Amino acid sequence: MSDPTPAPTAPDRPPAVEFRKVTKVYGQGTPREYVAISDVSFTIPDVVDHGEISSFLGPSGCGKSTVLRLVAGLEPQHPPTTGTVTVLGQGIVGPGADRGMVFQDYTSFDNRTVLDNVVFGLECRGVPRREREAEGLEWIAKVGLAPRRDATKFPHELSGGMRQRVAIARTLILRPRVILMDEPFGALDPATRLDMQDLLVKLWREVQATVLFVTHSVEEAVYLGDRVFVMATTPGRIAEEIRMPAAVGPARETQSEPWFHEQVNALHARIEQVEAAAKRPRNEHGAGQQVEAG
Ligand SMILES: Nc1ncnc2c1ncn2[C@@H]1O[C@H](COP(=O)(O)OP(=O)(O)O)[C@@H](O)[C@H]1O
Ligand SMILES: [Mg+2]
């Protein structure tokens, strides 16, 4: 286990991602008005030559996807109702090449081969065929697929894990500085999930990007996260930010070590406290009422 020693951040470097008092109200002014997230503030530093993985953990509906899609600049989450979202010091005006997103559902183009899916972004950028295909084959290998055997397959010929490898290759080939992952391994079986966690850590070390990773799994949040944001619901908000030791060993070994179980148990306990506090009746100021410990 390593200490969660902060890596060097230059004081003049703007944060990788910053939320300042961000509120998102869906359907504002309509009968369906709904406050998805309220007053969310956090700062993820741009760690020099390293990047960080931040895990976002919380119950369904607490606004995890809203947070990620605000960073991605995707409508209708973007723009926020109030507050500001910045990436590398710049206000978000819409989607951009500095940010890449991987979703839980398999979002490949069904009518394109693996290779054509992986190079899609390069094609959009006008990179010549020869060049983009050479790079695409490299990325197919990097994500653990077989360039020769798999490049010409279509998505329906792939397992869920393989499709997520394609999605990761398609995103990382564009070298985004910020990678947004919304429960990317949520639909995978446990063994494949561990393989994918190893893959993510390996690639993340190579590309040194900042990763925002949404998950339902406490184990996954602890293993991957340099920091974990525990979210609470109604309204969606950040209840806690916890620093974590960096993932150093392989997923299977690390996740069977005693210190890892301790971290997971401590986080489970913290989440239960947060959820219990969220369920308490609220007083007129909107704050959870204090309940005497008995
Ligand atoms: N486009 C939308 N219009 C209205 N309500 C939405 C929309 N997107 C999400 N919501 C609501 O906002 C809340 C937060 O959603 P979301 O960010 O998807 O949560 P999570 O990803 O944590 O499950 C949920 O109650 C959801 O129903
Ligand atoms: Mg979601």
Image: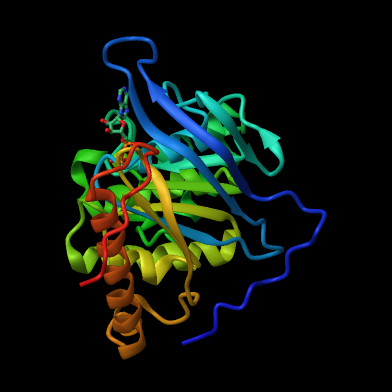
Question: Which is more toward the observer, 100 or 76?
Answer: 76
Left or right: where 165 falls relative to 73: left
Q: Quadrant of ligand 1?
A: top left
- State the residue lying farthest toward the right: 12
* Residue 116 appears in view: no
* Residue found 28% across the figure and 53% down from its top: 162
Q: Is residue 89 left or right of residue 40?
A: right
Between residue 32 and residue 194, name the one nearer to us.
Answer: 32
Which colour scheme appears in the figure?
rainbow
The quarter in which the C terminus is drawn is bottom left
Seen at 44% across and 22% down, the residue is 75
Q: Position of residue 212 (x, y in %)?
A: 47, 51
Residue drawn at (40%, 65%) of the image: 199
Image coords of residue 129 (percent x, y): 55, 34
**Foreground pick, 7 / 236:** 236
Q: How many marks?
A: 0
User: In the image, residue 234 lies at what x, y percent?
Assistant: 30, 39
* Residue 55 visible (yes or no): yes
Q: Does 240 sit left or right of 13 as displayed?
A: left
Is 189 positioned to the left or the right of 288 in the image? left
Nearest the eye: 196 or 213 = 213
Residue 186 to residue 91: above or below: below
Residue 18, position as x, y percentages in the image: 61, 45
Res. 117 image quadrant: top left
